[in-house]
Image (spheres, rainbow, N blue to C red):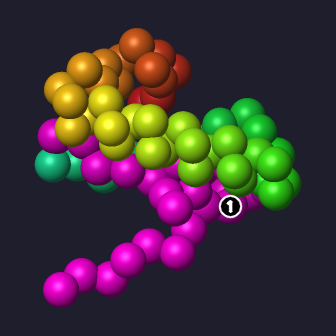
Amino acid sequence: MGRKSTSGGVRNECGHVQLDFSFQGRRFRPTLALKYTAANIRAGRRMVADIRQRIAQGTFDFAAEFPQYK
């Protein structure tokens, strides 16, 4: 039995919103250009939920979603 995340896949990285999810067996943490505020945290959680749903459906394209990710 695993631990359930309380952050919803959103973290604070130097005052900005950082998403946290797994894709194709690798963990990714892209940082968005959004300040870490309550409203942006909610938006980040919705974004992570949408990404996870598209991963489950097989329609997620990482390169198209995050073209500047290293």
Q: Identify which residue is drawn at 44% across, 36% down.
A: 50
- In the picture, measured across the screen, residue 15 lies left or right of residue 65, that is right
Label 1 sits on a secondary structure element that is strand
Q: Quadrant of residue 10?
A: bottom right
Q: Identify which residue is drawn at 47% across, 23% down.
A: 66
Task: Please give the residue where the numbered disc 1 appears in the rendered image.
Answer: 12
Q: Quadrant of residue 56?
A: top left
The C terminus appears in which quarter of the rendering?
top left
Q: Identify which residue is drawn at 33% across, 38% down.
A: 53
- Asked if residue 12 is among those painted magenta in the image, a careful observer would answer yes
Q: Position of residue 20 (x, y in %)?
A: 45, 53
In the figure, 46 relative to 2: above or below? above
- The magenta region covers 1-24
Q: Is residue 30 visible?
A: no
- In the picture, measured across the screen, residue 38 lies left or right of residue 48, that is right
Q: Identify which residue is drawn at 61% across, 61% down.
A: 11
In the figure, 21 relative to 53: above or below? below
- Asked if residue 21 is among those painted magenta in the image, a careful observer would answer yes
In the figure, 29 relative to 56: above or below? below
In the figure, 34 relative to 25: above or below? above
Question: Hey, what amino acid is under mark 1?
Answer: Asn
- In the picture, measured across the screen, residue 16 lies left or right of residue 50, that is right
